[in-house]
């Protein structure tokens, strides 16, 4: 009778240990997947692209154009700034593009008094640009 009792205890112990192992295994897998998902989202956010463009606006003689308006637009984003007194500008998006593919091109327009507006399409990954504005023709 004592041997039968030990066999029953051993069988119950194996069943309880197996159930405990199964439950713990499921919990560890669920937390691991959630942890990996968190790390993947963090890496994706850290490596996603934030738009930034800098450059100089000059006239046809090579002189800087002060206070020209520089606008860049892509998707539903529109960035705008003015050049400094030496013709330099920097555009930077507030947020990075993480949840969708970056655009191929950005529409750029540069405007200044006494100059023709300049429209161009530039690659999204271009970070520096030189813009030359042509003077307006004024007829007397």
Image: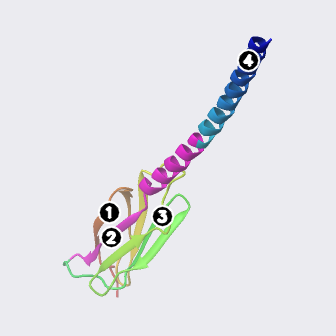
What is the C-alpha distance between the residues marked 4 and 3? 78 Å
Q: Residue furthest right?
A: 1
What is the C-alpha distance between the residues marked 4 and 1? 76 Å
Please give the residue where the numbered disc 4 appears in the rendered image. Answer: 6
1 or 76, which lies in front?
A: 1
Who comes first in sequence, dot 1 or dot 3? 3
Mark 2: give few (<14), some (14-19) or many (20+) Cα within 10 Å: some
Q: Position of residue 104 (x, y in %)?
A: 42, 50
Question: Contact, CB < 8 Å: mark 2 with mark 1?
Answer: yes
117 or 109, which lies in front?
A: 109
Mark 4: give few (<14), some (14-19) or many (20+) Cα within 10 Å: few
What is the C-alpha distance between the residues marked 2 and 3? 14 Å
Question: Contact, CB < 8 Å: mark 2 with mark 3?
Answer: no
Which quarter of the figure has residue 89? Answer: bottom left
Please give the residue where the numbered disc 2 appears in the rendered image. Answer: 54
Question: Tag on residue 127?
Answer: 1
């Amino acid at each position: 009778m004592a041997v039968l009792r030990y066999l029953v205890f051993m069988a119950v112990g194996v069943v309880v240990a197996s159930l405990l192992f199964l439950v713990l295994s499921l919990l560890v897998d669920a937390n691991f997947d959630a942890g990996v998902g968190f790390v993947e989202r963090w890496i994706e956010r850290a490596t996603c692209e934030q738009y930034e463009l800098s450059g100089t606006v000059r006239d046809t003689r090579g002189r800087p154009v002060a206070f020209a308006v520089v606008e860049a637009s892509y998707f539903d984003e529109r960035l705008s700034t003015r050049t400094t007194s030496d013709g330099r500008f920097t555009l930077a998006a507030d947020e990075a593009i993480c949840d969708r593919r970056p655009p191929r091109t950005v529409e750029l327009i540069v405007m200044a008094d006494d100059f023709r507006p300049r429209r161009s399409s530039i690659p999204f990954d271009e970070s520096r640009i030189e813009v030359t504005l042509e003077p307006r023709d004024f007829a007397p």
